[in-house]
Amino acid sequence: MEKASTYQELSADTLAARLNSIAAVTDRVGADTSQWQVKEVGDGNLNLVFILNGPKGTVIVKQALPYVRLVGDSWPLPLYRAFYENQALIRQQQRDPGSVPQVFHFDGDQALIIMEYLAPHIILRGKLIAGERVANLSRTMGEFCARTAFRGSELCMASGDKKADVALFAGNVAIPAISEALVFTAPYHEAELNHHTPELTPVVEKLRGDVALKTRVQAMMMKFISNTETMLHGDLHTGSIMSTDDDSRVIDPEFVQYGPMGFDIGMLTANFLMAYFSQPAHRSAADLGGYQGWILDQIREIFEHFDTEFRHLWKTERTGILYPATLFEDQGHSSDAACEDVLRQIYEDAFAFCGIEMLRRVLSLAHNADFETITDTAVRAPLEARNIMMGVELIQNAETVRDVASLIAMAERFNAGDIL
Ligand code: SR1
Ligand code: MG
């Protein structure tokens, strides 16, 4: 699949000469390269991202680098991840049409995806730091999580197709290895690339000495690795969502893998919670309560939309081998309790994965701008500490969190307390 020998890194200067014969590009931006404008805008941890603008229009050119951009060439990373990202985008487009950018062209040798330019969308995390509201966000995200979870599982898919897909995506070894290391392992010991706000050291030392906590996280990692319920986005944070005032799209599924249905909604919730806990540093006292309330509303509504959509799909698209009508409706038996049971397990997993993501984003390598843009560490540390303590509680007690209302009450409790 990967032919690294022909691969060449793009630059803003070489892009026109490299892409001028691709019809999928010239059809959309125009063929006169003298009028092309190219800007590299990648602000993620892994890839090059260019905006290519021409007389007819604009496209995004995304190219995987053979190393982790955030760290440099000391951390090599296979180019084949672009293949899986493209495959993931195709499946997400099928399972939730319109939720992801349209792909115009894929080149595996060059690890290149040319796709729809989303405008005037910007990264949601920036909007949350700026205190902006986005209409329809919770519906889009709740439905995206429910549709991709349900339609990518054997609740819906033909068993042979799903198993072939699990085998296909199992080839994407290097990317899950990043999550296995950075999300589930590094936060719990002094791993080389870790960093944290200095004032948090006493909290961090206590947490790293908590054997029960580490054990619980490892149990969740076992689920993450072994439980191939559905195709995950795999890295669904607020930097993987682009929004306008009223429209949101999901980008960057290169961390795609088959995994537990609660993973994506759990990671997403964690990132909204980190936005929530960081707000005292970003808002005036007059705006703080209202905006934090809006963020909590998004979390509650995401779960409500997820729940409604999942139950709807259960009734209308349960065509797979799991919980078949043969065993329930055809026998005159309701499957409502079975659906309830499946949802309960998804939420329990989601709450635990949520706690794990909340810890890794302040203890491991890849932190979030929500906290990192707070330059005064004396202000940042107490806010991160609230986030850490809620993360720990979620990991330890995920099964006792009854519902999203309890999750939100927990967030309000930690937000009101001072740990540092
Ligand atoms: C080395 S990559 C670090 C992080 O960036 C990605 O967005 C994932 O979240 C990964 O864990
Ligand atoms: Mg990403």
Image: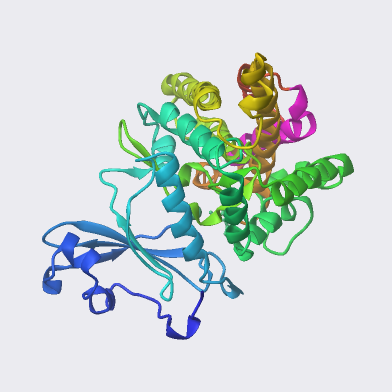
Task: Indicate yes or no whether the magenta region holds residue 398.
Answer: yes
Q: How many marks?
A: 0
Left or right of 151, for residue 60:
left
Is 237 above or below relative to 252? above
| Residue 160 spot, x, y in % from top left | 60, 50
Name the residue at 21% across, 68% down.
Answer: 23
Taking the image as shown, residue 29 lies to the left or right of residue 222, namely left
Q: Quadrant of residue 267?
A: top right
Instruction: Identify the residue at horizontal 60%, vertical 35% (top origin).
Output: 155
Above or below for 49 versus 117: below
Chain part drawn in magenta: 380-400
Q: Is residue 417 visible?
A: no
Quadrant of the rendered image containing residue 347: top right
Residue 368 percent location from the top left of the image: 54, 47
* Residue 207, magenta (yes or no): no
Return the residue nearer the eye: 147 or 175: 147
Q: Quadrant of residue 202?
A: top right
Q: Is 217 displayed left or right of 23 in the figure?
A: right
Side of 13 where 403 appears, left or right: right
The extreme bottom residue here reads 5
In this view of the protein, which residue sits in the foreground, 65 or 385?
Answer: 65
Q: How is the image coloured?
A: rainbow
| Magenta-drawn stretch, dominant element (helix, strand or loop) | helix
Residue 85 position within the rendered picture, expressed as x and y whole percent measured from the top left: 47, 58
Q: Is residue 112 visible?
A: yes
Quarter of the C terminus within the rendering: top right
Seen at 49% across and 23% down, the residue is 305
Identify which residue is drawn at 57% across, 68% down: 71
